[in-house]
Image: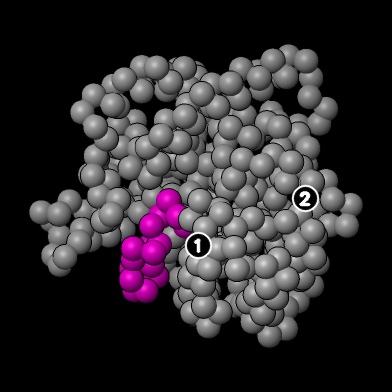
Amino acid sequence: MAHPNTTISPPPGAYVPVPTFFKSPSASSGLQASIDVETQVEHSIFLAKNGIRGLVLMGSTGEAIHLTKAERYDVVAGVRKGLDDAGFKDYPIMAGVLTNGIDETLEWLVDYKKAGAQWGLVLVPGYFGSAVTQENIREWYTVVADNSALPILIYNYPGVTNQVMVSPETYTTLAQHPNIVGCKMSHGNVSHHVQVSLDPAINHDKFRVFSGFGQQLGPIVHFGAAGVIDGLAAFYPKVVVRLMTLAEARPIEPFALQEVQKLQQAVSVAQEFIGKFGIIGIKEAIFRVTGFGTSEGGRLPLKGKLPDGAWETWHLRLLLPVQALEEQL
């Protein structure tokens, strides 16, 4: 498949890896809770109105692996239509591809293009773990990118791919492909973020580096990264957007640096909540803070709630400073 030289890259900024909203079990038919596209749209509009630059739908946080082909399409298409109707036409949407087979990966990407996503966020094929070589990763992504209906980003999340890490050299090579427009690194190796963000062999106007961790926002954006795809921003969007805006400014004035440091400290502390409770914690926080969704978690095996008293304890210890900053903005 030929790809034009005018392939559009995702704009820099703060994105949200949006969880998929489900109806309560009592309001659903079938074995599992039904998707709730109406709430999905309402939450997406809330994020867009509060400065979030774009969305990642059907990523790991979005539980794409727990959804059917039709459900994935309906969520992406529903959000696209909802955003368009609310005046956010062409709002950036990345859609996650969480399967290892090349043919099926390409099928997901065709569906996402039809549904209205502009990019595919394609997970590293890590089912076989240590047997996966950097050479094979490069070849796998090249075949996908050669044939993809959408421009793609490399999604490296070792926690769900048997600890497979993409090397900086592999990013350098794949960044040259006209249909590979960026990456998301969901791991704590800040050196990899910085190496790739500052690599002189990469065109950084075309290949954008994003982190999956808001606790890294200030350090990596200061050294050239395009932004973050951050779960905390799903319920405290203004703080993360403000931090992003200040971190990407050049030069950073002394008074702005003080605010960056204050915001980054509060955001980094609050991220401990997400690190502890993951997707269930994010969904609980969205419900508690914004009122969207329910506190019933995701689909099995992620169904469930926080332990009794956990929200109150963690909110008091870690989240109140961010909430206070959010309310000031």
Crowdedness near tag 2: few (<14), some (14–19) or many (≥20) residues, C-alpha within 10 Å:
many
Q: Where is residue 304 in the image (x, y as percent from the top left)?
A: 23, 44
Q: Which residue lies furthest to the bottom in this view?
A: 1
Is residue 180 at all visible to an observer of this figure? no
Tell me the amino acid under the disc marked 2.
Answer: Val
Answer with mark 2 or mark 1, whichever residue precedes in sequence: 1
Residue 40 percent coordinates (x, y): 35, 52
Q: In screen coordinates, is 197 left or right of 97?
A: right
Q: In which quarter of the image is the N terminus?
A: bottom right
Residue at numbered disc 1:
96
- Looking at this view, name the residue that lies furthest to the front: 130
Residue at x 49%, y 37% (from the top left corner): 233
Q: Which residue sits at x=30%, y=50%?
A: 302
Residue 234 vs 77, above or below: the answer is: above
Please give the name of the residue rendered at 78% of the width and 37% of the height, measured from the top-left corner: 223
Q: What stretch is highlighted in magenta?
A: 59-75
**Residue 1 at least partly seen:** yes
- For the residues labelled 2 and 1, the Cα–Cα distance comes to 22 Å
Image location of residue 221, percent across then percent down: 72, 37
Occupied quadrant, residue 324: top left
Quarter occupied by residue 58: bottom left
Q: Name the residue under label 2.
A: 196
